[in-house]
Amino acid sequence: MPRPFSPKVVTANDLIEGDVIYMARNGSWVREMCMAWLIEDEAEANTQLARATDEPGVAVGPYLADAAAGPTGPIPTHFREAFRATGPSNRFHGKQTQQSAPEAVANV
């Protein structure tokens, strides 16, 4: 029996800068997961993933990542996505310095 669909965000890496990016509801790309579109319909998620795949000049390696509704927007439900959302791990800079506290990770 297949697993039931769980909410997803479309994520990829920015072609030029390499940053983790997320698809917003208007189809643009944002750098913060809390601004991403939390897609709760499987058919819509697949449609948006196909749309992201058609943007090779912007997004590299798009895929659907599990997420949950948080107080300010989507939050990751898997440690890998929580790790990606904080930015590079080689030194404390970028997204890591902009957050006052680590994002909560649901169901990890």
Image (tube, grey):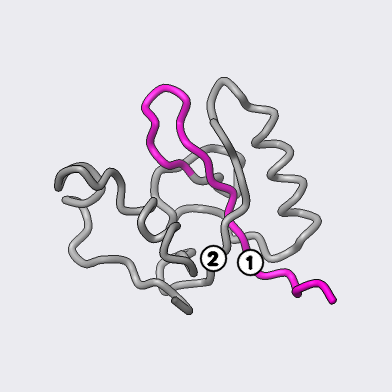
Quick check: 53 left or right of 70? right
Quadrant position of the N terminus in the picture: bottom right
Residue 106 lies, with reference to residue 81, above or below; the image says: below
In the image as oriented, which residue stretches furthest toward the right? 1
Question: Label for residue 17?
Answer: none
Quadrant position of the C terminus in the picture: bottom left
Where on the picture, by quarter, is residue 33? bottom left
Asked whether 80 or 56 is in front, the reply is 80
The amino acid type found where label 1 is placed reads Pro
At x 18%, y 63%, the residue is 100
Q: Position of residue 16 (x, y in %)?
A: 41, 22
Label 2 crowd (10 A; few <14 / some 14-19 / many >=20) = many
Q: Are marks 1 and 2 in contact (CB under 8 Å)?
A: yes
The amino acid type found where label 2 is placed reads Ala
In the image as oriented, which residue stretches furthest toward the front? 1
At x 21%, y 67%, the residue is 101
Quick check: 9 left or right of 75? right
Quick check: 101 left or right of 67? left
Q: Earlier in the sequence, mark 1 or mark 2?
A: 1
Q: Position of residue 18 (x, y in %)?
A: 39, 31
Label 1 crowd (10 A; few <14 / some 14-19 / many >=20) = some
**Image: magenta residue range:** 1-21
In what element is the residue under mark 1? loop
Residue 100 lies, with reference to residue 97, above or below; the image says: below
At x 77%, y 46%, the residue is 47
At x 41%, y 67%, the residue is 72
- The residue wearing badge 2 is 67
- The residue wearing badge 1 is 7
Q: Position of residue 14 (x, y in %)?
A: 45, 31
Quick check: 83 left or right of 95? right
Whether 6 is among the magenta residues is: yes
